[in-house]
Structures are given as structure tokens and as C-alpha cells.
Amino acid sequence: MVETMQHWRLDEVGRAHLRLAEAPPSLNFRDKLVIETGMGLDIPWPLTPGSDVAGSVVASGAEVRATR
């Protein structure tokens, strides 16, 4: 395993303060449970842990369907 990973870090309010930094690798608690136990989930392999990823809602409404 690598000793450090890159992550975006904000030390105070404002876009000008956003910077790419290095830190020890870490996973959130849910990812740790999935890795160690599977949590009873029907996991599609291969899996990339990432419960804390971000995204954008690009549509909503009755006609919107999920894509996979």
C-alpha cells in the first residue's frame, strides 16, 4: 500500500484556499465494513471503495431513470 495519497484540502473558506495536498491513505467506516465483511451486499466485482465520493444531480422527475 502507498504511504501517502493526494486529496483536496480546504483550510479556510474560499476557493483560493483549496489546494491539492498529501496525507496518509484512509477509508471511511462504511468502506472499511464493506472491505472486511461485505455487509451482506450483492457486490459487483471489481469494487472501488468510495462511499464518500461527490457528484452532481443532473436530472430529476418521474421520467428520470438510473444508469449503470
Image (tube, rainbow, N blue to C red):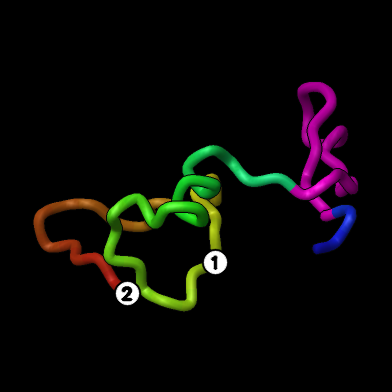
Q: Earlier in the sequence, mark 2 or mark 1?
A: 1
- Helix, strand or loop for disc 1: loop
Is residue 31 toward the left or the right of residue 59 in the image? right
In this figure, which residue is indicated by the disc labeled 2? 68
Q: Residues within 10 Å of mark 1 (few under 14, many from 20)?
A: few
State the separation of the CA atoms marked 2 and 1: 15 Å
Residue 13 drawn in magenta: yes
Q: Quadrant of residue 2?
A: bottom right
Percent across and percent down for residue 42 are: 27, 65
What amino acid is at disc 1? Thr
Judge whether residue 13 can be spotted in this image.
yes
Residue drawn at x 36%, y 73% is 44
What amino acid is at disc 2? Arg
Q: Which mark is residue 48?
A: 1
Q: Nearer the viewer, mark 2 or mark 1?
A: 1
Percent across and percent down for residue 7 are: 78, 49
Residue 11 drawn in magenta: yes
| Magenta stretch bounds | 5-25
Percent across and percent down for residue 22 are: 89, 48
**Which image quarter is the N terminus in?**
bottom right
